[in-house]
């Protein structure tokens, strides 16, 4: 006749219960279920795996009418995005060029303009450059959604030791599945080919076949059907930006004074750009005691 095992002492049971509770607290929470109607913008978080989308209810954007000096690229990107929103063929877009000229602002402004024409037409999904290798997981989530998405990576570039660009190449137009029909990819960069010139020159000097080495690198930017270049603005465009901001935010100032102060502001920063113009307007509004909140239609 066998005897039944002795029960755990009370203190042992309590210890095990505390250990189990501690392990539950240490375990990462399950990613929230993706609700594609929760917002018009989302941020992709690669951790915890397999990643999750955080809804952003308030997008940091300016009306498209306030973007001056980029008329041609503005119209091209808007037309491409409108076609995509209607389910028509459209291209991935690379916005490259001078810093501070409104590349990322234009992407967000275009999204707002399209959604004002028809509510919930598009959603913006921002992915950080370091999370590019997790693009396949993100696309798997978006592929099953009925909404259409502009996948956006700001300040995209790659260094010599960075191999993430190969993941992006495969996602944009390679692979068996390819890019989902409801997803388009927009990126901004200061570099036309997304790679530093010295990196490309090094490939040319050390590769067995220099031509093939360079082709392999620049083929990434070829995946973008639209290359939209942004260049340093003229003084005329700089003044036009300031006039638009003053009119929109009702900043009453003599034009001669505005121009003189704005020129001095730009000289202290060594450049004229949309970012410099906006920084001056923030300083001007602060000195005038006026908040930059409501935009006049």
Image (spheres, helix red, strand yellow):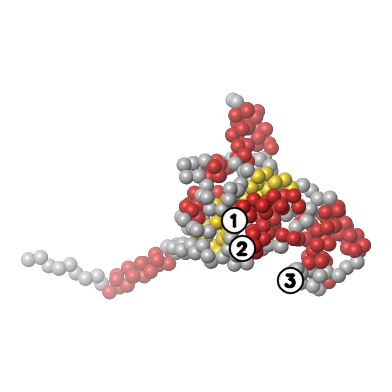
Q: Mark 1 points at which residue?
A: 85
Rendering coords of residue 191 (x, y %) = 69, 43
Please say if the residues under marks 1 and 3 sit with CB atoms less than 8 Å apart. no
**Local crowd size for mark 2, using a 10 Å CA cut-off: few (<14), some (14–19), many (≥20):** few
Quadrant where the C terminus sits is: bottom right
Q: Quick one: which residue is furthest to the top in this view?
A: 208
Quadrant where the N terminus sits is: bottom left
* In front of the other: 70 or 125: 70
Rendering coords of residue 28 (x, y %) = 45, 62
Of mark 1 and mark 2, the one earlier in the sequence is 1
* Residue drawn at (49%, 64%) of the image: 35
* Residue drawn at (46%, 56%) of the image: 144
Q: Mark 3 points at which residue?
A: 294
* In front of the other: 31 or 36: 36
**Local crowd size for mark 1, using a 10 Å CA cut-off: few (<14), some (14–19), many (≥20):** many
Circle 3: element type = loop
Of mark 1 and mark 3, the one earlier in the sequence is 1
The mark found on residue 118 in the picture is: 2
* In front of the other: 105 or 155: 105
Circle 2: element type = loop
Residue 172 lies in quadrant: top right
* Residue drawn at (62%, 27%) of the image: 210
Rendering coords of residue 12 (x, y %) = 29, 70
């Amino acid at each position: 006749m066998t005897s039944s095992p002795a029960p755990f002492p009370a203190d042992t049971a309590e210890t095990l219960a505390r250990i189990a509770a501690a392990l539950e607290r240490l375990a990462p929470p399950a990613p929230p279920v993706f609700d594609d109607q929760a917002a018009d913008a989302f941020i992709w978080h690669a951790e915890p795996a397999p990643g999750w989308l955080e809804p952003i209810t308030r997008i940091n954007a300016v009306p498209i009418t306030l973007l001056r000096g980029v008329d041609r690229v503005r119209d091209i990107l808007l037309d491409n995005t409108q076609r995509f929103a209607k389910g028509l063929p459209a291209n991935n877009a690379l916005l490259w060029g001078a810093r501070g000229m409104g590349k990322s602002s234009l992407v967000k402004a275009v999204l707002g303009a399209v959604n004002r024409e028809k509510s919930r037409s598009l959603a913006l999904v921002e992915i950080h450059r370091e999370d590019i290798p997790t693009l396949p997981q993100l696309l798997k989530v978006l592929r099953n959604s009925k909404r259409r998405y502009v996948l956006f990576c700001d300040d995209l570039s790659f260094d010599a030791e960075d191999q993430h660009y190969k993941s992006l190449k495969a996602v944009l137009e390679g692979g068996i599945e390819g890019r989902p029909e409801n997803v388009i990819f927009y990126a901004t960069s200061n570099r036309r080919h997304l790679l530093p010139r010295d990196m490309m020159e090094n490939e040319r000097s050390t590769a067995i076949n220099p031509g093939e080495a360079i082709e392999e690198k620049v083929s990434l930017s070829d995946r973008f059907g639209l290359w939209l270049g942004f260049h340093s603005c003229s003084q005329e465009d700089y003044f036009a930006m300031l006039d638009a901001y003053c009119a929109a935010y009702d900043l009453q100032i003599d034009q001669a004074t505005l121009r003189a102060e704005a020129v001095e502001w730009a000289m202290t920063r060594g450049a004229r750009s949309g970012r410099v113009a906006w920084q001056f307007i923030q300083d001007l509004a602060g000195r005038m005691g006026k908040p930059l909140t409501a935009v006049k239609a």
